[in-house]
Amino acid sequence: MILLQKYILLILFDIDIRELIHLNDVENSFSLGPNSSFLYCFDFLYKNIEWLLDKIKANKEKYFILDTPGQIEIFTQSQSFKEIIKKLTNHKELDMRLCVVNLIESSNVLDLSRYVFSIMNVLNAMIFLELPQINIISKIDLLKDYDQSSMHFPLSFYKNPNDSDILKQAIDESNVNPKFKKLNTLLCDFVIEYGLVAFDTLSVQNQKQLNKIAALVDKANGYIYMDTGSLKDEKYIEIRNQIARNDLDFDHDDDENMEHL
């Protein structure tokens, strides 16, 4: 299985793409900025896809994480990245079950414009990559370090935005240029109308949340309905079984605690 996150261009667990191509070499050789260099790296990786496939075949019993850069161009313009995903998905010998994990930082809930923009990016990735996707508000524990007076809603609303009217009203009441009011209305209606985006929260200090995310990924790719595999932690297995039954009440206590950060 491949778990996609947005930070560095590495495949963890014995495969390092820097063996094939290095971002710094691209920047220095072609005088490109980081965004263009990342796109070049994915083009180069796709042209050498057999290198990647051979590396995965040699480690195919392992759990892979493809940790990608956060540049939005990769998820909107890089056909090479999309084709790499297709190659991995359709490779019969590898039988890989792919799932996207899309992370946005918790500070985005402090600015409605950034929050709506993040949702648009999430939707864009869902459409472009055509894979099961889990969306996470990460670093949730750091919210306590910010001035939360700019949070217009309880955290539960940001996790599951479901009312376009109150979202539009809050944006209009912010210091947003009035000429963008119609655009904001259309964006909010688009985001809410289809109900495709919801978020879970994550603090890496919270083992229960980590277990929940791992179980949600297993459910998205179908692995949750197979043998429990190598991860024998009892707390993980308990959460995994609850998620398999669609019994999500177990995390309500955590949510209530977060509301009072």
Image (spheres, rainbow, N blue to C red):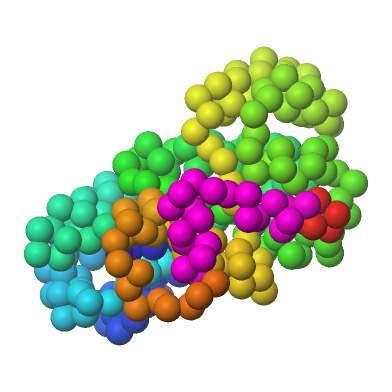
| Residue sitting at x 23%, y 65% | 45
Where on the picture, by quarter, is residue 173? top right
Q: Position of residue 11 (x, y in %)?
A: 34, 73
| Residue sitting at x 66%, y 66% | 203
Q: Position of residue 83 (x, y in %)?
A: 22, 51
User: In the figure, is residue 150 to the left or right of 245?
Assistant: right
Q: Residue furthest top?
A: 182
The stretch of residues the image draws in magenta is 236-256
Is residue 39 at least partly visible in the picture? no
Q: Residue furthest left?
A: 93
User: In the figure, is residue 104 to the left or right of 33?
Assistant: right
| Residue sitting at x 85%, y 44% | 150
Closer to the camera, 81 or 23?
Answer: 81
Q: Is residue 246 magenta?
A: yes
* Count of residue discs: 0
Where 95 falls versus 197 (above or below)? below
Q: Position of residue 81 (x, y in %)?
A: 29, 54
| Residue sitting at x 85%, y 54% | 260
Closer to the camera, 3 or 47?
Answer: 3
Is residue 57 at least partly visible in the picture? yes
Q: Position of residue 191 (x, y in %)?
A: 57, 28
User: In the figure, is residue 5 to the left or right of 106?
Assistant: left
Q: Is residue 112 magenta?
A: no
The quadrant of the picture occupied by the N terminus is bottom left
Prevalent SS, magenta region: helix
User: In the figure, is residue 65 to the left or right of 181?
Assistant: left
Where 141 falls versus 111 (above or below)? below
Where 129 falls versus 45 (above or below)? above
Where on the picture, by quarter, is residue 151? top right
The quadrant of the picture occupied by the C terminus is bottom right
Where 62 falls versus 245 (above or below)? below
